[in-house]
Amino acid sequence: MLHNLAIAGLAAGTHRQYLQMLRSFHGFVAHRYPAQVRAAFGVGVGDGGLDRFNRVRHAGDDAPAGLPPTRERLEAFFSFARSQVAVACGYRTAARDYAMLRTPYLSAVRMGELVRLDQADVHPRLGPSGKLHVRFGKAANTSGPRPRWAPMLEGLEKILAWYLTDVRPLFPDTEALFCDDDGRAMKEGTVRDRLARLLDLEDGTWAERFTPHALRRACATHQYERGMDLIAVQPRR
């Protein structure tokens, strides 16, 4: 069934809806009819089902929902991520992940915008501390992508300058700002996976986990707490 959905070209969100229905039905059967299933088939309902390796992972599977992480939590996380750059076997990958995850937190770009940034979209001389040219901003209704400028806040211009000078040349020479080992632009799911991997290595509690989207929310929250007008970080053309 899922194969047919993929062949039909349906959106990932539609895949997740079908999977959620299957998971809900599985939970219903496991709760209401465990004895009948075991008697009829010789196995328990909980012995199989949709485990985490057999379902499309959604951002909500990686972290609890709720308030964005605090400034102190993110300072601790990024300190850990920075330490991994120094000790990781794959320096360029660890360094890329660090710069990549700092970007939404210090610019409020969306994941869909982050993965479509090119190297040429970094403009360190625009504004007080530089800006990112988001050429594929989120569309309103059916108006199509809306380009906008996103500010680089709290030293992001220095992080990206280091990344572009010392790290990005270690990857294939393509236009993408953040790319995989083949030079292709990162996928949103890959960004989630890289963050989840770092959180696993950090080995914190479930309550301390967060998603890439939470980094964008944390940016707006923390800048507001610092006294910045939210209009300054809101999406604008």
Image (tube, grey):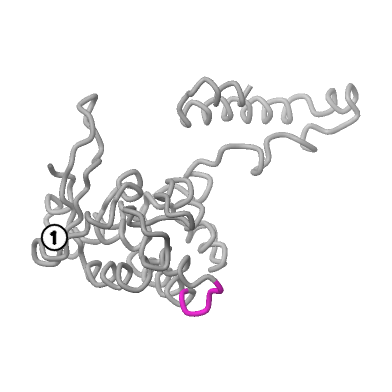
Q: Which residues are magenta?
A: 85-89
Taking the spot 44% from the left edge, 52% from the top edge, the residue there is 191
Q: Quadrant of the N terminus?
A: top right
- Residue 40 % position (x, y): 89, 21
Amino acid carrying label 1: it is Met
Residue 178 or 237: which is nearer the viewer? 178
Taking the spot 68% from the left edge, 35% from the top edge, the residue there is 50
Position above or below: 214 against 101:
above
Res 69 → quadrant: bottom left
Query: So how many labels did they put on this image?
Result: 1
Res 165 → quadrant: bottom left
In the image: residue 132, left or right of residue 60: left
- Magenta span dominant secondary structure: helix
In the image: residue 136, left or right of residue 13: left
- Quickly name the residue at label 1: 228
Position above or below: 193 against 35:
below
- Residue 80 % position (x, y): 46, 73
- Residue 141 % position (x, y): 23, 26
Label 1: state its secondary structure.
loop
Taking the spot 28% from the left edge, 52% from the top edge, the residue there is 118
Pointer 1: residues within 10 angstroms few (<14), some, or many (20+)? few
Residue 184 or 59: which is nearer the viewer? 184
Position above or below: 67 against 141:
below
Taking the spot 83% from the left edge, 33% from the top edge, the residue there is 44
